Every structure is written in C-alpha cells, then in structure tokens.
Amino acid sequence: MARNKYSVLLPTYNERENLPFIIWLLVKHFSESGIDYEVIIIDDGSPDGTLQVAEELQRIYGKDKIVLRPRGQKLGLGTAYVHGIKHATGNFIIIMDADMSHHPKFIPELIKKQETENLDIVTGTRYSGDGGVFGWDLKRKCISRVANFITQMLLRPGVSDLTGSFRLYRKEVLQKLIDACVSKGYVFQMEMIVRARQFNYTIGEVPISFVDRVYGESKLGGQEIVDFLKGILYLFATT
Ligand SMILES: Nc1nc2c(ncn2[C@@H]2O[C@H](COP(=O)(O)OP(=O)(O)OP(=O)(O)O)[C@@H](O)[C@H]2O)c(=O)[nH]1
Ligand SMILES: *[C@@H]1O[C@H](CO)[C@@H](O)[C@H](O)[C@H]1NC(C)=O
Ligand SMILES: [Mg+2]
C-alpha cells in the first residue's frame, strides 16, 4: 500500500506571533510520529509581516516541508482553502487555524481514527468526550453552544461539533465538498459537514481541547452572528 501524505492547509492573516510556534509544533509532532507531511501557508497579504516570518521558517525547515502560497490581499478563508488545495501534493488534507487554537498534538489522533475506521472525514470536536473550550468568555461560549444547538435541531447532521474547523479529509472528498459548498464565513465549516452527509461520506470524531487565541484580534461580532443565522436557515431550506 502506498504511504499516505498529509498536506496541512494553514491560512494566515496577521499571525506573525503565532506562526513560528505552530510550525515548530507541527514539525515536532509529524516527525515524532514518522508521518509524511507538508504545510501549505496561505497568507493573504497580512500587514503585520506574517509572510516574511513564513519565509524565514521555510529557510529553517525546508521547501519540501513548508510551502508558501501567498495571495496579495485578504480574500477570505473559504477561497484560501480552494487556493491551498490546488497546490497540495498529499492524498489527505488537514485544515486547522494558525492562531494556536488548534493544537498539532491532536493530529496523530485524527490520523489514527481515519486509519482504523477507513473514514472519509475526521473532525475534531469540542463537545464530546474530553473535548472542551478554554479562554472564551461566557458570552462567546453561549453563542457557540446556541449556534451548535440550533444547527443540530434543524439539520441533524450526526456530528457534535459543526462550527469547528480542525479536520482531516481525503483530498478528493474535500475537493468535492468545496465544489458543492456555496456559503462563506462561519457557515462554511458547517455546510461542509451537512453536504458530506448528503454525499454519504463517512465521518468520525476525535475530542479536542480548543484554546482561544492569545495573540492577535478576534473578529466575532454582531454581523457574524446575523450571517450565521442566515446561513443556517439557507442550509435548512435547501437540504
Ligand atoms: N488567508 C487567510 N487567512 C485568514 C483570513 N481570515 C482569517 N484567517 C486565518 O484563519 C484562521 C482562523 O481565523 P480566526 O481569526 O482565528 O477566526 P476565529 O478562530 O473564528 O476567531 P478568533 O480566533 O477569535 O479571532 C487563522 O489562522 C487566521 O489567521 C483570510 O481572509 N485569509
Ligand atoms: C445516500 O444513502 C441513502 C440511503 O442509503 C440513499 O438513499 C442516497 O441515494 C445516497 N446518496 C448518495 C449521494 O449516494
Ligand atoms: Mg481563532
């Protein structure tokens, strides 16, 4: 059997402080478990100089491990994945945030789950087993819980964490889902799982602990919540 290769898609926008640490952890956990990998950094013209930090990291860890696919301006997360997957050479794709909310130590667990059950998708979940959220204030915890609850009621996706974005996909599965998904922003991660159910892909879950960003700014505001509700209703109406 051919050996698997894992391409990590790492979108960045103003992650200068976080990037060296997340890359160091990724390299550490991949090399310790003897897993073949590459990290594709998709920086959207961050004004804080994230790209220069990424270039330095590429010099340290090598061009085969750290791949840079920058874009000139902030074009959004959804299209960052579309852009990144085009350059991925692995047969599996891992999607995660670069702000240290998603710890690379969970990656071997996602991979093991995929291998033992031969799954199409494995998603990190904050809402079952040992999973959890750290560093969020009560307001944000409530918003996240309520959003998840509403979605569970309306869409019955059979997955406990819909808005999380720490996931492992077979490459061709992710490509099909990206082609099928229409929503943007926060709803995107949720639509991916809802569509995956429609296509009858097999999905597994691994409990993860999610830690709020220490460096950099959060953007969750009233407009995001309104967009999110609109997105759920759209999915409810069309699936
Ligand atoms: N390439 C690219 N990356 C982005 C863009 N927006 C956000 N990101 C990155 O996508 C990941 C998730 O974004 P976050 O800002 O952490 O979103 P969040 O986790 O919902 O919110 P906070 O962590 O509270 O700010 C991070 O690695 C960001 O740097 C974008 O427009 N383009
Ligand atoms: C998924 O499975 C259901 C039930 O077995 C079936 O009716 C449906 O046609 C399948 N959908 C696809 C896209 O294969
Ligand atoms: Mg974040």
Image (cartoon, rainbow, N blue to C red):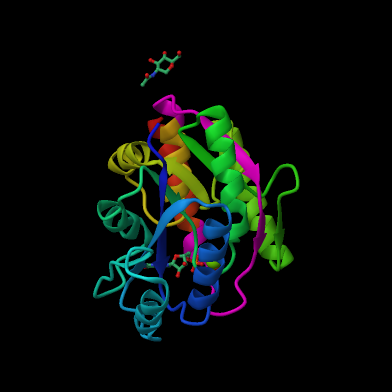
Residue at 57%, 44% in the rendered image: 110
Q: How many marks?
A: 0
Quarter of the C terminus within the rendering: top left
Q: Is residue 231 visible?
A: yes
Left or right, 51 with respect to 142, comes to left
Magenta segment range? 197-225
Q: Give the camera-side residue of 117 and 140.
A: 117
Can you tell which quarter of the image residue 40 is in? Answer: bottom left
Magenta span contains residue 211: yes
- In the figure, 228 relative to 140: above or below? above
Left or right, 160 with respect to 73, comes to right
Instruction: Residue 30 in the image: state x and y as whole percent.
Output: 52, 57
Residue at 28%, 41% in the rendered image: 179
Q: Is residue 219 visible?
A: no
- In the figure, 57 relative to 130: above or below? below
Left or right, 180 with respect to 115, comes to left
Left or right, 83 with respect to 133, comes to left
Instruction: Residue 166 in the image: state x and y as whole percent.
Output: 53, 52
Q: Give the camera-side residue of 40 and 42.
A: 40
Magenta span contains residue 126: no
Instruction: Residue 63 in the image: state x and y as whole percent.
Output: 32, 69
Instruction: Residue 223 in the image: state x and y as whole percent.
Output: 47, 64
Quarter of the N terminus within the rendering: top left
